[in-house]
Image (cartoon, rainbow, N blue to C red):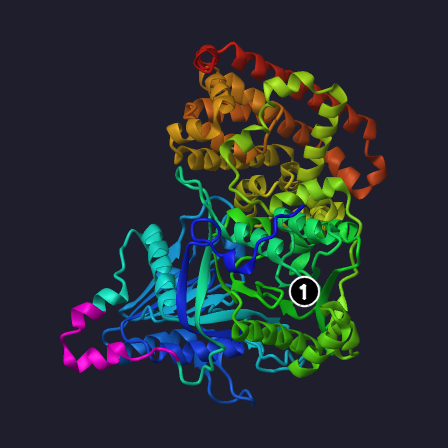
Amino acid sequence: MTEHREASSLCVPGRNCWRLETAARVAFLVDADTYFKAFVAAAELAQRSLLIAGWDFHSRTRLLWDDQGENGHLDLGEFLNDLTRRRRDLEIHILIWDYPMIFGVDREWAPLLGLGWKPRRRVHFRYDNTHPTGGSHHQKLVVIDDAVAFCGGIDLTCRRWDTRAHAADDLRRVMEGTPYPPFHDMAMAVEGDAARAAGDLVRERWRKATGETLRPVVTARRRWSQRLRRRSTLNASRWPQSLEPNLHNVKVAISRTEPATHGSGGVREVETLYLDLIASAKHSIYIENQYFTAERIGQALAERLAEDDGPEVIVVLRELSHGWLEELTMQTLRTRMIRRLGAADRHDRFRVFFPFIAGLQDETCIDVHSKMIIIDDDVVRIGSSNIANRSMGLDTECDFTIAADGREDVQKQIRALRSTLLSEHLGVSAEEVQEAVANAGSLRGAIMQLAREDRTLKPLTDLNEVSDTVLNMVSMADPERPVAMNDLVKLFTPDVSSAVGMRWWMKVLVAIGIIGGLTAIWEFTPLAQLLEPQKISAWARSTGDAWWTPLLVILAYAPASVVMFPRPVITLFAVVAFGPWLGFLYAMAGVEVAAWLSYAVGQRLSRNTVRRVAGRRLTHIIDVLRRRGLIAITALRLVPLAPFSVEGVVAGAVRIKFWHFMLGTAIGILPGTLAATVFGNQLQAALRNPASVNYWLIAGVILLLAGGAWVVRRWLISSSLSSPSHDVGRARTA
């Protein structure tokens, strides 16, 4: 049975929150139009410090619109620069995630490249690159003079602004001339000690990211307190008069996620509080979230749904995903979680909805981006954390939580917030929602009672069947911890002790699963169109005479090795475009360039770090690679047991001799490249007539590679077992 916790004992510093501080005033901000107005009004009152930490930032974000979309325009970058012109003591610090270029399509490159928007003096713009591989800085905080703070799911960036109307034809919802769909999100504003604690959190993030220490504003106040001219200004409230507070004098719990890095165990307060909240629920759990994939959260919800007297669980998600890749990964994992909860729902208390409004274009929906949960009428939590594995342990997150602790005024406001959100989704008044809940006796009953045709919450029922193989493959898109070196080494060799007891047919299935997973992206997604035979042949013939084509072919091997694009396709392209001999030379040059780049990346890693992080298993393989470098690299390239780029990174990290690595790579990839060259004409003919493909030959090659892989794997295992360091390691652990 689930351990139930009373709301009053929920927020415990050191367990599920970092600090529990008093907020003199609190306001719930629904949607970015409300949040941006509050941010502008509060920032106008800033005197000493304005701290911004986020996943993204865009200087051309439009903060204010009037009802007609014609006047009152205010861009973020211009606004911040103007603040420092008018406040000569104001320092602005902006810290955002140092994102990979794959996320750069919708982001602003200007601050990074020195183009476009130029932050004025005293506007300090930095990128946070301290996250582990695969992780991100996802906290979304704004702190003004340590007096007022905002926390939620809304970044100060583009494609966030919208009103509660979420009108399908709102012309103000546009970025650089391109319209975007309705966007729903939330934030919380706090004043007082809770805001000061948020300032401490941002300053610590800044220190870790930049090495610079920022002074708390309280220090500045003490230093300037003797100057009567400024005393009244420094003591003035930063809470905007236009912002109506919902609560007064309540405790705010600040919960974090921080990944385990540099020997630290990480922080998982976000996950712990989610589990404690779910365990405390008596009547209802109302969730709004961008994602719904976190395994431990799903298990906790399933246990409550299985109880005879457990709470009802209402989840509001967006209908569609952003693009085919997210649909393949996060939406697939969401489907798995919803099905599991549906199976656990013995008493018909689980519902999943998406907000619907008539008139939206096809393949668009209201983008639910909020990260919010309400437990009964007793607890509200708003922050940056998605209900996804990565928000539990991999990304940095921050949430604000308020528990009523028996206060009727707080319970009333929490209940009003939930009614406000449901009224927005259903297109009715908050009073109608409260009346329907009272009449129906449940949230799900009220939602069905208030359903309309043009605007409503629709049940999310489009749940496609997904195989276990696909689920296992896409689960890598939502990790809860960084991918350590020993995870990569598993591709090189299985654990010796477990391999002894594994049956041969299980090994075959595992091998098939790995190969299938690596090739699925280029086989079963829209990217498969790039591999259509007619397109390859046509591209090769049309571009072969261009002067830049050889350079493009050579450079293409490096990114192809990283994203698992099949390199033989590039080799075939080169053979068709330039003929067998030039095609062979360009292909060999491209593979060597790709190998050199991966080796250079590996060289940046500390050898001791690799050994310490990877553990004993990689230590044994390192000994084999270092003692038999040329032969080992040649074997691995002949029969690859890991992705091409991973092999290069590991080789560079363990300091295999460079000429051993490059020569071993050249020898190892020579047979395959030469085969593609020699049979180039036959392959080109096969492109024109797929019926001419010799499938028996293909099957023979696969069997030959499988046999070679088995031989090389056994050789690596036997070599590692016979290495001197293995004997030493075994003696040390005896």
Which range of residues does the magenta coloring cover? 221-239
Report which quarter residue 311 is drawn in: bottom right
Q: Name the amino acid, label 1.
A: Arg
Give the crowd class for mark 1: few <14, some 14-19, many >=20 residues within 10 Å. many
Residue 184 is inside the magenta segment: no
Pointer 1: what residue? 318
Q: With 83 as the anchor, is 560 left or right in this view? A: right
* Residue at figure coordinates x 65%, y 51% from the top left: 293
Location of residue 596 in the rendering, given as x and y in whole percent from the top left corner: 46, 34
The quadrant of the rendering that contains the N terminus is: top right
When the figure is inspected, residue 534 is found, relative to residue 602, above or below; the finding is below
Is 274 located above or below residue 120 in the figure?
A: above
Q: Where in the figure is residue 331, as x and y percent of width and height?
A: 69, 55
Within the image, what quadrant is residue 699 found in?
top right
Residue 701 visible within the image? no
Q: Main secondary structure of the magenta part?
A: helix
At 55% across and 75% down in the image, what residue appears? Answer: 413
Q: Position of residue 325 (x, y in %)?
A: 65, 53
Magenta stretch contains residue 233:
yes
Identify which residue, 72 or 691, lies in the foreground: 72
Residue drawn at x 74%, y 50% is 306
Q: Is residue 263 visible?
A: yes
